[in-house]
């Protein structure tokens, strides 16, 4: 239940197209709905926070993911599950309809509404090709939440000239997501070149002393550049959500409608 859905529901009631009983039936699951013994679905979250409840599939059984996903589909036009392995998807795909699976980002989602107007302003870039899975998780998450995302991949500090050629795009962004493993240096460089807030995403890409992304995380937390915020290791989803919220605020403050 989001603001648009609630608004239409009340309009239909005023017009007499729905009865009070029918409206109450649709509101019964607010603020949440219990599902079997293992889940409480937060249908109220989009109305409360502007972002939908998202399924974290890792650690759940295929049946649990399927049950939660299909139940959310009945009430929400956009459903997203993260950390869906190819094996998990193979087990449930025959029981799903109207969905898209991205094996790179490990995301399962309902097919986006192509008529939805998107907000411009988010740029996602990676230091290396190996960082793309996390970057795609961030980019697709932001897209599903109503944004148009530009991607710039493989522009790490080992070849800084690759980044410089994209400065015109970066300097027009409202928010930049920078995804990097190894020493995690790229966010500091980018933050020193743009006025937009920057979300740094450390990845677990790197050799032994990278400690599965800990080295990149610490480097980003200790960035000497201002305006850098850091999410957890490999947390592309969190970066995509934060970018969506920042871009919404930026659009509202500038008086620009989504385009």
Image: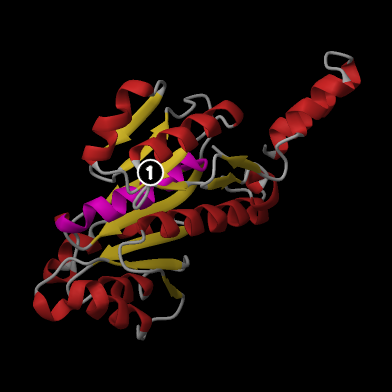
Above or below — where is 68 with respect to 254? above
Residue pointed to by mark 1:
140
| Residue stretch rendered in magenta on the structure | 130-147
Residue at (49% x, 46% y) in the render: 54
Colouring scheme applied when the structure was drawn: secondary structure
Residue 174 in view, yes or no: no
In percent of width and height, residue 17 lies at 83, 13
Residue 234 at what x, y percent from top left? 30, 62
Where 126 falls versus 90 (above or below)? Answer: below
Note whether 85 is above or below 239 in the view shown. above
Query: Mostly what secondary structure, the magenta segment?
Result: helix
- What residue is shown at x 34% (from left), y 51% (from top)? 58
Image quadrant holding the C terminus, namely top right
Residue 255 is at least partly visible in this image: yes
Relative to 125, say whether 77 is above or below.
above
Looking at this rendering, what residue extends furthest in the front direction? 37
Q: Position of residue 68 (x, y in %)?
A: 49, 37
Left-right relation of 135 to 13: left
């Amino acid at each position: 239940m989001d603001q648009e859905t609630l608004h239409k529901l009340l309009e239909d009631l005023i017009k007499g197209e729905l009865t009070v009983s029918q409206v109450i039936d649709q509101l019964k699951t607010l603020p949440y709905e219990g599902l079997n013994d293992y889940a409480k679905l937060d249908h109220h979250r989009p109305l409360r926070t502007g972002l939908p409840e998202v399924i974290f599939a890792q650690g759940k059984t295929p049946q649990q993911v399927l049950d939660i996903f299909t139940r959310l589909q009945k009430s929400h036009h956009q459903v997203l599950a993260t950390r869906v392995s190819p094996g998990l998807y193979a087990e449930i795909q025959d029981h799903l309809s109207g969905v898209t699976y991205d094996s790179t980002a490990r995301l399962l989602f309902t097919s986006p509404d192509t008529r939805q107007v998107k907000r411009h302003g988010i740029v996602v870039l990676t230091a290396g090709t190996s960082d793309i899975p996390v970057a795609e998780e961030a980019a697709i998450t932001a897209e599903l939440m109503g944004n148009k995302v530009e991607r710039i991949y493989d522009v790490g500090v080992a070849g800084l000239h690759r980044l410089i050629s994209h400065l015109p795009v970066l300097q027009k962004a409202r928010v930049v997501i920078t995804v990097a493993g190894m020493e995690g240096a790229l966010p500091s460089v980018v933050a020193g070149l743009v006025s937009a807030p920057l979300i740094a995403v450390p990845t677990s890409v790197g050799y032994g002393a990278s400690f599965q992304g800990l080295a990149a995380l610490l480097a980003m937390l200790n960035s000497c550049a201002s305006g850098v915020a850091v999410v957890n290791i490999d947390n592309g989803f969190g970066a995509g959500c934060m970018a969506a919220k920042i871009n919404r605020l930026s659009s509202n403050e500038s008086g620009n409608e989504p385009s």
